[in-house]
Amino acid sequence: MAIAAAAVIVPLGLLFFISGLVVNLIQAVCFVTIRPLSKNTYRRINRWVAELLWLELVWIVDWWAGVKRSGCLGSTLAVMKKSSKFLPVIGWSMWFSEYLFLERNWVKDESTLKSGLQRLRDYPQPFWLALFVEGTRFTQAKLLAAQEYAASTGLPIPRNVLIPRTKGFVSAVSHMRSFVPAIYDVTVAIPKSSPAPTMIRLFKGQSSVMHVHLKRHLMKELPETDDAVAQWCRDMFVAKDALLDKHNAEDTFSDQELQEIPRPKKSLLVVISWASLVIFGVLKFLQWSSLLSSWKGIAFSAFGLGIVTVLMQILIRFSQSERSTPAKVVPSKPNSKEPEQTTQDKHR
């Protein structure tokens, strides 16, 4: 099984890695030459350049693996942990695309988040900013810690979600209220009849099904004070927990008919174009260098493929929530309504 997975990962990984480096190079050139002259022009160009990379991942999900889901690409940004930007290709593209990177230390992150959100005020196109309010990936160990914390502080005990860390959410609402029209509450669940869409399954082309529930909240309808916004966020997670209870019992979010999103042809076109360019380039390079005509050349080629395989394994391990460090329960404090971050959780 490991050999079969590697046989799939290596060619897909090689295509993604080479094309990703090309995208990173274009982004770097635009960052140095265009951004100093016009930030908005750079952002418009970078949007289309970044899509050349992200559409490859969309193709893997939609066309290769056949995962049934809905999504958005375009000018999508996210708040990520700082270590993400050091990931080859993906992390570098995130940095050029102005993702917000935090250290999970509010003393340091408060100013970083504030300045990053203010930069989006003059963003020239509609954008989505993904904010993972729970602050960490979901594991059973972390769920147990959240339940223990909730029991010790009198909060509703979660069954399917973690307790939201509201400081970042409150800051986002405070700084974006004037130019962001709405918040989308997104809940994702895997039906019982479908295996989870892990990275290994995706690369092996194995299909999965994902149910996505979206609810739109107008920004102008949110409370005005920071404390009320924080409570609104906690209430949303209580409702989200109940929604997941319903899905666990009925294998659906509602009685409405599921809406399937057709596979985008744009991602297929991008992957075909990249594959043609990369294959042509590799063949021309091998012809020019005679790399496979000697043992040294063969060894060098094998070494390069090994690097690609290792990088893809790093990406896969990075995506697996089961490997994240269990959170510790912090002793409750009087009037505390939100779990504090431990040193271990900050550097997970």
Image (cartoon, rainbow, N blue to C red):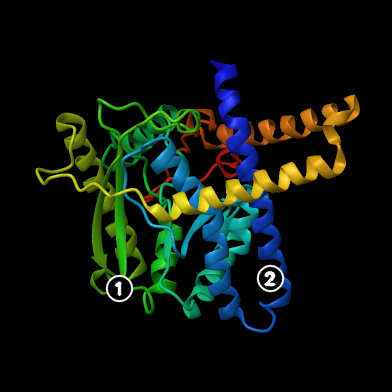
Establish if 71 lies above or below 148.
Answer: below
Residue drawn at point x = 66 percent, y = 43 percent: 279
Front one among 178 and 318:
318
Element type at mark 1: loop
Front one among 287 and 52:
287
Residue 125 placed where, x, y %? 44, 75
- Quick one: label 2 or label 1, which is nearer the N terminus? 2
Residue 259 placed where, x, y %? 20, 48
Q: Residues within 10 Å of mark 2 (few under 14, many from 20)?
A: some
Label 2 and label 1: CA atoms lie apart by: 38 Å
Where residue 276 is drawn, which disc sits there? none
Residue drawn at point x = 53 percent, y = 33 percent: 324
Residue 335 placed where, x, y %? 36, 51
Q: Would residue 104 be found to the left or right of residue 75 on screen?
A: right
Amino acid type at image mark 2: Phe
Front one among 68 and 279:
279
Establish if 33 lies above or below 251.
Answer: below
- Where on the picture, by quarter, is residue 289? top right
Where residue 224 is drawn, which disc sits there? 1
Front one among 294 and 120:
294
Residue 340 in view: no
> Considering the image in quadrants, where does the C terminus appear?
top right
Residue 69 in view: yes
Residue that carries the numbered disc 2 in the rendered image: 31
Element type at mark 2: helix
Establish if 341 lies above or below 79.
Answer: above
Establish if 258 lies above or below 141.
Answer: below
Looking at the image, the residue that sits furthest to the bottom is 37
